Every structure is written in structure tokens, then in C-alpha cells.
Amino acid sequence: MNITTLKENQYYILLIDGELDASSSITLDNALTEALSKKESKILVDCSRLNYISSAGLGVFMSYLQDFETEKISMVLYQVSEKVKNVFTILGLDSLIKIVANKDEAIGLMK
């Protein structure tokens, strides 16, 4: 798995490519830690190339929710495949993490 980080205007974008499992979740953890350290307030997570997420990957996202709330950071996942989105939905995590269809919708939530 690879994560590419981009800065577009005021948005910090993480593009996840591959499978997010126990061994690769460290990469996501590092990317989110970097966003926090840079005081990025609007994080968009492009999941168009994410084809699998394990409980470890979910755990990384969940572990940042309190920090993001405290620091007033917004995070939205977009272009999530049905297979991956179902994992969030089954576990009820879709009520804690914003998941939308596309980038424009994600940006719209942050205005």
C-alpha cells in the first residue's frame, strides 16, 4: 500500500492505493500524524484505489477521531468502494466518519 499526500488550496489530500491491513496501517498512522503536526484542518482521504481495509486500518482512523475533534480538524473519506464502505457500515463507523461519493461533495462538507 502507498499513500500519496497532496496539498490543494486549503485541503490536505491523502490518496490511499492498495490494501490497508495490519502491516500497512503504520503508513496511514504516519500520514495522519504528519497532517496533525502540520496543523492541517481539512483532510480529504481519496479511497478510489483502496480495495481492502482490515480492522487495523479501521482502528487507525478511529484512533484519530478525538484528536481531530479537539484540534477542530475535518476529515472526509470519498470515492470509497461499496465493499470497503460496507465494512464501515456494518461496524457502525459510518456514523462517526464522514463518507461521501466524490471529492466535490467532500469539499462541500468542509465549507
Image (tube, rainbow, N blue to C red):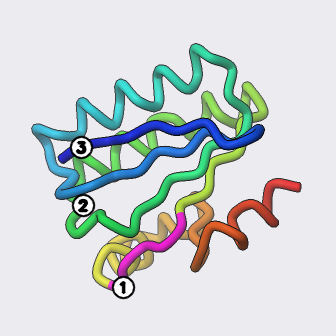
Q: Which mark is residue 2?
A: 3
Q: Nearer the viewer, residue 90 or 111?
A: 111
Label 2: state its secondary structure. strand
Disc 2 packing (10 Å; few <14; some 14–19; many ≥20): many
Residue 100 position within the rendered picture, expressed as x and y whole percent measured from the top left: 60, 74
Where does the magenta region start and end? 78-82
Query: What is the three-letter code of the residue carrying label 1?
Result: Glu
First of labels 3, 2 by sequence position: 3
Amino acid type, residue under disc 3 in the picture: Asn
The answer to whether mark 3 and mark 2 are in CB contact below 8 A is no
The answer to which image quadrant residue 39 occupies is: top right
Of the two numbered discs 1 and 3 on the same chain, state the one appearing first in sequence. Answer: 3
Residue 62 spot, x, y in % from top left:
45, 45
Task: Return the residue at label 2.
Answer: 53
| Magenta span main SS | loop
Which of pointers 3 and 2 indicates the residue nearer the eye? Answer: 3
Identity, as a three-letter code, of the amino acid under mark 2: Ile
Left or right of 99 in this view: 108? right
Spot occupied by residue 76 in the image (x, y as percentages of width and height): 61, 57
Question: Is disc 2 in contact with disc 1, using a CB cutoff of under 8 Å?
Answer: no
State yes or no: residue 55 in magenta.
no
